[in-house]
Amino acid sequence: AQSVTQLGSHVSVSEGALVLLRCNYSSSVPPYLFWYVQYPNQGLQLLLKYTTGATLVKGINGFEAEFKKSETSFHLTKPSAHMSDAAEYFCAHNDYKLSFGAGTTVTVRA
Amino acid sequence: GAGVSQSPSNKVTEKGKDVELRCDPISGHTALYWYRQRLGQGLEFLIYFQGNSAPDKSGLPSDRFSAERTGESVSTLTIQRTQQEDSAVYLCASSLSVESYNEQFFGPGTRLTVL
């Protein structure tokens, strides 16, 4: 069965530093992969998705992710963290329904 | 345009009572999904509807859970004889269709507390 694994339940970064959130998937076929963000007491918002085509995907708020089939990874990055990036981030695979990773909580230090 | 809306935003109930949670999807979206987010348990798929096709109920945790959808509009998730382990945020989402490349748009959720 398809699953995604997020490494690290909590990440703390300084404002202006690189944000790197790790996601690995298990599948024998190219998956449809998504990154969602959840701000406190809100629903989920799509950051970006990979379906087919270009493996480097750019999303909203300066985030991007690279699909690497050889590493079965879809890590999320942002070059420079902002205080407003503090939230919980979920990697997910879509096979007609979303299967989510456990989530990574990001805190940003001033 | 209007996004996915859910009501109520918060619901407190006593163990053993029945509850109904409502979801209004984005107009024109044929697919509608319910997920559950329990503290420390992550996000779990419950059920999805696609047009007039039979719903995929594979994620419903027990027969106390049921859901209905009227055409391609509102959906109601019903939990009968609520238990404390049902306490969670219930999220509804909709998409243009159930195809896996489509974005699912989420509502703000209903926070259910079972005392």
Image (cartoon, coloured by chain):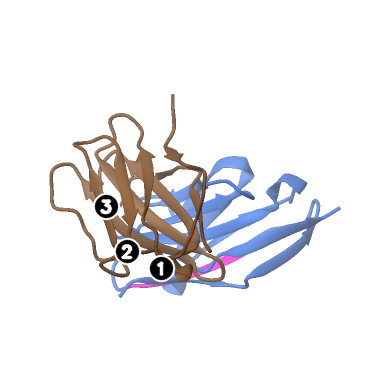
Instruction: Find disc 3 in the rendering and name its residue.
Output: B67
In the image, is A29 to the left or to the right of A62? left
Q: Chain of mark 1?
A: A
Q: CA distance from mark 1 to mark 2?
A: 8 Å
User: Is label 2 in a helix, a strand or a loop?
Assistant: loop
In what quadrant of the picture does the N terminus of chain A appear?
A: bottom left
Q: Which residue is drawn at the image coordinates 62% and 49% (left, top)?
A: A39
Q: CA distance from mark 2 to mark 3?
A: 32 Å
- The answer to whether one can see residue B45 in this image is yes
Instruction: Where is residue B38? Give x, y as percent.
Output: 50, 65
Q: Which residue is drawn at the image coordinates 53% and 44% (left, top)?
A: A59
Task: Work out whether A61 lies above or below A52.
Answer: above
In the image, is A69 to the left or to the right of A20? left
Task: Work out whether B85 lies above or below A93.
Answer: below
Instruction: Find disc 1 in the rendering and name its residue.
Output: A69
For the residues carrying marks 3 and 1, which lies nearer the camera in this image?
3
Does label 3 lie on the same chain as label 2? no
For the residues carrying marks 2 and 3, which lies nearer the camera in this image?
3
Start and end of the magenta stretch?
A: A21-27
Q: Look at label 2 and name its amino acid.
A: Pro
Instruction: Find disc 2 in the rendering and name its residue.
Output: A30
